[in-house]
Image (spheres, helix red, strand yellow):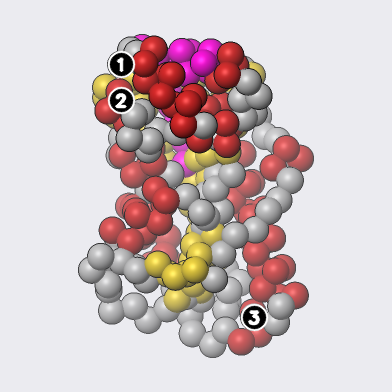
Amino acid sequence: MEAGRGVAPKNQTFEIILGSSSMARREILAEMGYEFTIMTADIDEKSIRKEKPEDLVMALAEAKADAIVMRLKSSYQLEEISRPTLLITADTWFLHSDGFLLVGNRLFEVKTYLHLIGIEVVVYQGTIREKPSSEEEARQFIRDYSGGSAQVVGSVLVTNLVTGSRKGGWESAEVYFLDIPDEVIDSLIEEGIIFNVAGGLMLEHPLTWPLVDTVIGTADCVMGLSKTLTEKLIQEAL
């Protein structure tokens, strides 16, 4: 497992596993002052569907937490845990206008064991968008967000791996975009990273974030991990 370190480490009495490869979530957790390790796991996200985004983000976070717990059990690592151990999983939905769209996989594992899992989902006009399959599709995806708005719904689930208890919740925020110039769209397409993200939407990208006009809510919720909610649930789960 890869290790991560907070910029100002807390006097931590537990371990955290961040179950995600997302750089944004790593940075947020580090900013909170936690030391952690990273572990990833895969689930069939397409098999999990809920009508409400709040229910979906929680269901996905629970599924990823379950998958990592099983992985720890199968490798006998769970039996070796003696310190307070929390598993934190998180999931984020971006809702554009009157629809939702799947934005991608995010899995955080926190090791106290805190297991942090994150997923981003976006829906556009009622249609779930997968990763762009062509330059034309990617270009259209991004243009749809230009000058528009999106709602973000993010969940955090903390599972105490020693006691088995779980604490979870969700927060929401609204994001308003400026017009996205064609040259920015061209650069994003040329770079290619948007082809690895469902819906082609990556808010934390240095070319995308400056084009965010207003955020009603917290930026960390938009980026995939609410600091306030995560801290609250960590304390409740310990």
Q: Position of residue 93 (x, y in %)?
A: 51, 34
Say what secondary structure mark 3 lies in.
loop
Q: Position of residue 130 (x, y in %)?
A: 64, 28
Looking at marks 2 and 3 on the same chain, the residue that comes earlier in the sequence is marked by 3
Looking at marks 1 and 3 on the same chain, the residue that comes earlier in the sequence is marked by 3
Question: What residue do we see at 70% from left, 82% from top?
Answer: 76
Q: Amino acid at mark 2?
A: Val
Q: Are marks 2 and 1 in contact (CB under 8 Å)?
A: yes
Q: Residues within 10 Å of mark 2 (few under 14, many from 20)?
A: some
Q: Position of residue 18 (x, y in %)?
A: 49, 62
Residue linked to disc 3: 77
Residue linked to disc 2: 212
**Picture quadrant where residue 132 is located:** top right
Q: How many marks?
A: 3
Looking at marks 2 and 1 on the same chain, the residue that comes earlier in the sequence is marked by 1
Question: What residue do we see at 42% from left, 19% from top?
Answer: 185
The stretch of residues the image draws in magenta is 139-154
**Picture quadrant where residue 4 is located:** bottom left
Query: Which mark is drawn over residue 178?
Result: 1
Task: Name above or below for residue 162 compared with residue 131.
Answer: below
Q: Amino acid at mark 3?
A: Gln
Q: Residues within 10 Å of mark 3 (few under 14, many from 20)?
A: few
